[in-house]
Amino acid sequence: MPQIQLVADLPGHSAAAWCVAFNPSRPLLASCSTDKTVRLFSYTLPSDSTLSDPFPAADAATPKLQLVQSIPTEHKRTVRSVAWAPGGRTLATASFDSTVGVWEEVEAGEMGDEGVSGAAGGEMEWECVTTLEGHENECKSVGFSADGGLLASCSRDRSVWVWEVQPDADFECIAVMMDHGADVKNIAWHPKEEILASASYDAHINVMFDDPDGDWGLFQRLTPTLPAADLHIPHSSVALVAAMGDSPAEAAANAIDVPPLVEAETVWSLAWSPCGRFLASGGDRGGIRLWVRMGSNPDSELHEVIHTSAHRGACYALSWGPGGAADGAGLLASAGADGRVIVWQVKALTGDGDVPGATIEPVAAMRDAHGVADVNSIAWNVREDGKGAGLLSSAGDDGSVKVWRVVKD
Amino acid sequence: MTFAGALTITDLDDFLTPSQACIIPVRTSNKPAGQETGENADTEIVIDSNNNYYEVSTYPTAAAGPSTNIEVAGRQQLKKAEISLNDCLACSGCITSTESLLITMQSHNEVLDFIKAGDFARAPVLSIAPQTLASLSASYAAAHGTEPIPLLTLLRRIRSFLADPARGGWQVWDTTFARHVSLRETVREFEERRASPKSLPVLASACPGWVCYAEKAQGDLLPLLSAARSSQGVMGALVKKFWAAQNGRNAAEVYHVTAMPCYDKKLEASRQDFYSDVYKTRDTDCVLTTGELDLLLAEMGFNPIVPVDAEEAPVSTLAAIDSNAAVPFPELLQHPGSSSGSYLATLLTSLAASHPKPTRVISRQIRGSTDNVEYLLEDVDGNVLFKGSRVYGFRNLQNMVRKVGRESGLGKGGPRGAGAGKLSAAVAARRRKARTGAGEIATPSTPGTPGTPPVDAGADLATAALLAARDEKKLDFVEVMACPGGCVNGGGQMKPATAGSKEAKPDGPVDAEGYPRPLPDDGVAPAPLPTNSGLSGADEGMRWSTKEWVDKVEAIYWSGLPTPPASPTLAPTVPATGASAGEEPVPVLPARTRAADALADAVIAATLPESGDRYDAVRTKFNRVEGDVLSQGGLTHEQVRW
């Protein structure tokens, strides 16, 4: 069975690291933190890194990573989220200071009169080209749409904003949606269409689109209903059972008879499958739900098909990359408050009923991925040229940033 | 805190609500023991059985555990933090909504108490906004299944009802004459400011929601706000200064209540500018929303469909001040243009009238929205004289703020916060490059803005030049309103009859953040599109009636007037994208409105002090609200971690 292998333990932030994101076109990884910086790491792939098998051998040459730059963002509070635009030339940061920063790379020599003295020509520097204001308080998540034409952000102020990206680093607000009843934790753009999902403390997921008859708006409000099914671990994997099984502390906690919670749970995380047919959501009690899209219209509804137990604490992050089975559903990575990083294989079923089915099984897991710290973020490297596929990065509450890969046993 | 009934049926989402934990108690709290001396200042707050708060130092016996420390360490009783309305106005907001605070201070109950007290040493005056009358009329029509009551008739029925000495013997007027004064002051101010282009554009300041937002979040733009008082601001001066003096009273001897379509008008009335230090009174003592006025009238037993004497009497034409007139101001003056005060249309009218050549108005909707429309005034030679914009709703307001910031170099159009001050010459150069590159296709000076259609090389050069001139013209005036649809859709207006009563009161368990758990279904849940809707009629009405309802109120607003205007609204007829703009006539003021000019001049002359200081009656000032928790970065609430 495959295993998760540490590729690099990178020079971490001086405070909690919140989000990691791989550049979609270049060998760059971005991370952000309560220390208000964005760190950029570059990686060099081994020469023979063509992937025929989804998982390389455990002793295959590993990519080399190094810190390139630490950008002092001048955000006034925690930088909670980073996101690259398609093409990888623009970076967006979402901060608890309520703003979204948009960053582009400029030549340092281009700095003009106030330029850095003696800067070598051609040296590149990331610069804030505009700040998007409007949220009343902590901005929690930011993301670009599939073609980079739109940017969305969400906040504790319960709103989800959509901005149109215009030339000259200009942005025009085209929607402010107040459909959530509480803090909006996360947003996720559909991988192909202009469909946006948002997850909230109000225990719902909203799905929005640009209504042809009007403005941007909610077209479906997803209410989780399925009870969590027991985790199914393939018995053949001793390592997996060891990684997924209870730690002594967890076992002790389980021994205490806690009446089941009846209240609705915060939805922390969202991820669309690369094919766009599935949406995964991570909940406060650690379960992962799968929602399937019932058609291919812009406003085709989503149905909940699976709710599996996964983490022993909140599932803070999900990332869905290609790989594994050939049906397009791919590999889903999850991370949570229990310190685990888990990689799942999702398979689409051509069900005989009205609702297409799916299966989800853990493939590999890593316990205590960031020591005792919570794992706040997880991200697959998905590049337009396919290079570096299979790399997985995570960010810990202790400020650490790590890179992993899934290898054959 | 109990909420007024009007609030519980009101969806507060349209409001710019305060956002941060209140920092006033932090500011005023005593310093922990040992802080001055730089010692360890670990303290705990202890509450005793009498609800007294004590600060208890846990230093230096930290090893023994806090529970034992409390008894041995010094106790210091803490002052109770008191938060006044002025604190709230000077602050960027708090968890306790400012609106809820104001609602208890300015509610229909306060007015009822005034009436019940029966002490009419203060002469009661009620000034009703025309948008409020329109909303009430629509609501009464829906409730009674009748045709909408014309605004003038409704005004006179309310006047007749409240004039009863048993109910206080109220003077009941509308605010349109005050609006006329406000509009004239807006024109006057614009003429003053256009002499120096740096003080343009003028941003209308009649919307208190926008003003509140600008003072808290867009301090750099405050110099651009119109100094002309809003209708309510002028009305306050007319009632407390002019009318009171005419009747031998001082300002404190008049109790002035306004009825407004908007909750934030309560905030406006509380501004320091509208407070008289001499008489210890405000120009407007209490602001009721439309919903609260309805509650007040209902509790007193008002029946809107019963006719009263002389309700069909013709409107008076007052040419001069007449202290004997039953109604001292002309009733329901019309100002064609918008149902949000017609500030932009009035400027267009005035500028067209003063221009020596014939003019025309070109309008274009931005993104097909009637809430975001540009108006250009051009003369027959194709000179662009004026560019105005109607910007309603929070989303459009955001884009306006960015645009004005860019054009004026003020505000936050450029980078701020992140990367503040770092916008390098490089980015500016790149932007210029992009512009000139795109401009080569048409004329060299045309900015390549997305709204400009590609002009093919053989096209009429004059047309291209005109389009370029239109695009290059910077904004001169913006009619800004925070509510989508403007004042007829104000947050204090009556809701559609089918709505309401669906809001579940959070009487169940609430969680740590005060949200009910499990969360009530708010009616938005799985909402299919109307085309394939399986919803019941009532539910569908919930979702889709709001716009219809606002349209209805808008129609009543323009129809129930003494003489309906020929061209009611300045709504663009052509949904223009890019440069395919609609042309329309310059709005014309009705003769009766123009005739009010003489009275307006006389009233202002009689109201202004000897110094002629216009800020005493018809102008106001705006102040940047400091103490913004976010911008100071001092008090971070990192406990709100995720």
Image (cartoon, coloured by chain):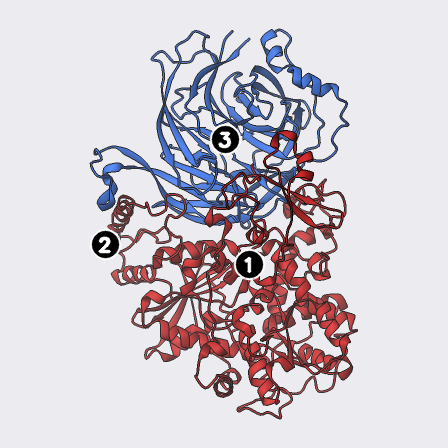
Say whether mark 3 and mark 1 are on the same chain: no
Secondary structure category for the residue under label 1: loop
Cβ–Cβ under 8 Å for marks 3 and 2: no
Residue type marked 2: Pro
- In this image, B109 relative to A406: left or right? right
Chain in red colour = B
Given residues B45 and B189, the one toward you in this image is B45
Please give the residue where the numbered disc 1 appears in the rendered image: B484
Cβ–Cβ under 8 Å for marks 1 and 3: no
Chain in blue colour = A
Residue type marked 1: Pro
- In this image, B211 relative to B157: left or right? left
Query: Vertically, is A226 above or below B480?
Result: above
How many residues crowd mark 1 within 10 Å: few (<14), some (14–19), many (20+)?
Answer: many
Disc number lying in front (1 or 2): 1
Disc number lying in front (3 or 2): 3
Q: Which of the two labelled residues, at mark 1 and mark 2, occupies the earlier sequence position?
A: 2
Residue B444 image label: 2
Quote the CA–CA distance across marks 1 and 3.
40 Å
User: Quadrant of residue B165 in the image?
Assistant: bottom right
